[in-house]
Image (spheres, rainbow, N blue to C red):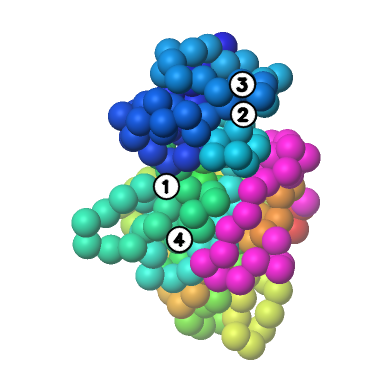
């Protein structure tokens, strides 16, 4: 059971005091009955909630797929730069949302936004072996021997050792490599290619686990994940 004011605040992206005012105004109904007490208990799994006459689908947590554009920070808020949470449309916005993991400011593609901390921890923890798939466009050509070095586990410029990775060249012009890694070191993909004297000029994440970026989402667009898609995140990634 959950407090009504807490539920209304979360679902309507209101402060707790704003939710209480809404309840006191008579705008909130539970199972067809107007409720004026902020501390009323509600079962979000079975009770019907209406606000201003409209039925509200109550979700304890949100799981959102975003096609991240370049130039946006993977953060909940920032005073100087737009963030991925700022991109969400009003119907997907509420307090407490944050990116589960991060993409560099200039990296594009699949990012999950949620307010479920346990889910996010499972997603980003290397111990859960969730592979992330990227397409890296390189400054210069790369040899199969250099790819083998990265497959075996790159040693970055500062001596940091990476876990073995999966790599496959998918284009010669421009030279493009598909990469699968299951850890998230700072600027990892870029630093991996730097360790074999190459540079990444564009980087896009295309999948997390078995979940692929929805090709119908334009850059900056977002939608809710289905339950099945959420499970796909923790399924074995398609081997490249």
Mark-to-mark CA distance, 2 and 3:
9 Å
**Mark 4 or 1, closer to the camera:** 4
Give whichever of discs 1 and 3 has the lower sequence position. Answer: 3
Q: Which residue is mark 2?
A: 49
Q: Residue at x 71, y 67 (%)?
A: 215
Mark-to-mark CA distance, 2 and 1:
43 Å
Which stretch did the figure color magenta?
214-238
* 185 drawn magenta: no
Q: Residue at x 58, y 26 (%)?
A: 29
Q: Which residue is mark 3?
A: 33
Q: Is residue 157 above or below residue 58?
A: below
Indicate left or right for 217 with 146 as reference. right
> In the structure shown, which secondary structural element does the residue marked by tag 4 occupy?
helix
Q: Is residue 18 above or below residue 84?
A: above
Residue occupying the far bottom of the picture? 173
Indicate left or right for 85 with 166 as reference. left
Among the 4 quarters of the image, the one containing residue 229: top right
Label 4 with label 1: CB-CB less than 8 Å: no
Give whichever of discs 2 and 1 has the lower sequence position. Answer: 2
In the rendered image, the quadrant that contains the N terminus is top right
Q: Residue at x 48, y 81 (%)?
A: 139
């Amino acid at each position: 059971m959950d407090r009504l004011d807490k539920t209304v605040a979360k679902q309507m992206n209101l402060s707790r005091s704003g939710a209480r005012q809404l309840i006191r105004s008579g705008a909130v109904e539970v199972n067809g009955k107007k409720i004026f007490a902020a501390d009323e208990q509600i079962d979000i799994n079975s009770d019907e909630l209406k606000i201003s006459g409209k039925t509200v689908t109550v979700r304890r947590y949100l799981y959102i797929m975003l096609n991240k554009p370049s130039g946006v920070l993977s953060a909940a808020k920032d005073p100087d730069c737009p963030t991925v949470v700022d991109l969400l449309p009003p119907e997907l916005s509420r307090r407490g949302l944050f990116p589960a993991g991060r993409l560099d400011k200039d990296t594009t593609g699949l990012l999950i936004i949620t307010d479920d901390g346990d889910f996010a921890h499972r997603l980003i923890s290397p111990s859960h072996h969730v592979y992330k798939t990227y397409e890296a466009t390189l400054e210069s050509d790369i040899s199969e021997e250099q790819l083998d070095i990265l497959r075996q586990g790159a040693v970055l410029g500062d001596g940091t050792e990476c876990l073995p990775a999966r790599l496959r060249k998918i284009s010669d012009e421009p030279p493009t490599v598909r990469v699968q890694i299951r850890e998230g070191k700072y600027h990892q993909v870029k630093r991996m290619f730097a360790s074999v004297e190459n540079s990444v000029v564009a980087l896009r994440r295309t999948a997390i686990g078995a979940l692929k970026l929805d090709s119908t989402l334009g850059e900056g667009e977002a939608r809710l994940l289905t339950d099945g898609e959420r499970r796909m995140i923790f399924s074995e990634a398609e081997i490249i």
